[in-house]
Amino acid sequence: MKTDANLRYMTLVTYVPAIEQLVVEIFVRNARRSITFYEQLGFDLAEDRGAFVVLTWERHELFLDQRPDLPDAPVFPRANVRVMVADVDEFWRRAQALGAEVLAPIGDRDYGLRDFTIMDPDGFGLRFASLLNDAS
């Protein structure tokens, strides 16, 4: 039986690939600084239009929109993006080497992930996570 949700999904996949249906765009004060930060964490630069940048993570896109008049970074981000990785400890080392501001240090969580959360230079949260070995 086709429900309204199923029909809506079928319509969505016909006009844009599923991987492009939900893309996060964040505002940054300095695109160059943000590109460097994200590349050092493992993101790839897919497109650079100067004030607008497309980064990718395993085909998923993250848009950066430069806004030089952006207010200072908030004390605590209003949102974060979770990035699943095979070895979260490796990404913890990368974040430490960058001197990224830590919101939640690395640890095993009761929700089945080993993760940590950092802030990017403009106050956007990034949470890197791996499945715990006993979580399946």
Image (cartoon, rainbow, N blue to C red):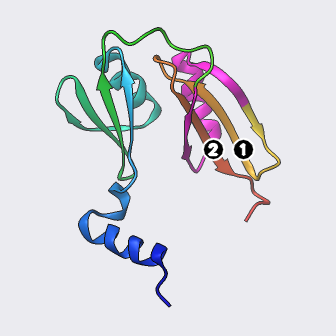
* Res 107 → quadrant: top right
Secondary element at tag 1: strand
Disc 2 + disc 1, Cβ < 8 Å: yes
**Residue shown at the point (26%, 32%) measured from the top left:** 53
Q: Residue furthest bottom?
A: 1
Q: Is residue 116 left or right of residue 7?
A: right
Q: How many marks?
A: 2
Instruction: Give the answer, above or below, for where 22 lies relative to 30.
Output: below
Q: Which quarter of the image is occupied by the C terminus?
A: bottom right
Secondary element at tag 2: strand
Q: Residue furthest left?
A: 49
Q: Residue furthest front?
A: 4
Q: Residue 128: image x %, image y %?
A: 59, 39
Q: Is residue 77 left or right of residue 47?
A: right
**Residue shown at the point (27%, 72%) measured from the top left:** 14
The disc placed on residue 114 is 1
The reply to whether the magenta stretch includes residue 104 is: yes
Q: Which residues are magenta?
A: 78-105
Q: Residue 40: image x %, image y %?
A: 42, 28
- Residue topped by disc 2: 129
Three-letter residue code for mark 1: Arg
Q: Residue 80: image x %, image y %?
A: 56, 35
Q: Is residue 33 left or right of residue 83?
A: left
Chain-order first, disc 2 or disc 1: 1
Sort mark 2 into few (<14), some (14-19) or many (20+) by Cα contacts within 10 Å. Answer: many
Relative depth, front residue between 135 and 13: 13
Relative depth, front residue between 51 and 58: 51
Relative depth, front residue between 96 and 76: 76
Sort mark 1 into few (<14), some (14-19) or many (20+) by Cα contacts within 10 Å. Answer: some
Instruction: Give the answer, above or below, for where 1 lies relative to 112.
Output: below
The reply to whether the magenta stretch includes residue 128 is: no
Three-letter residue code for mark 2: Ala
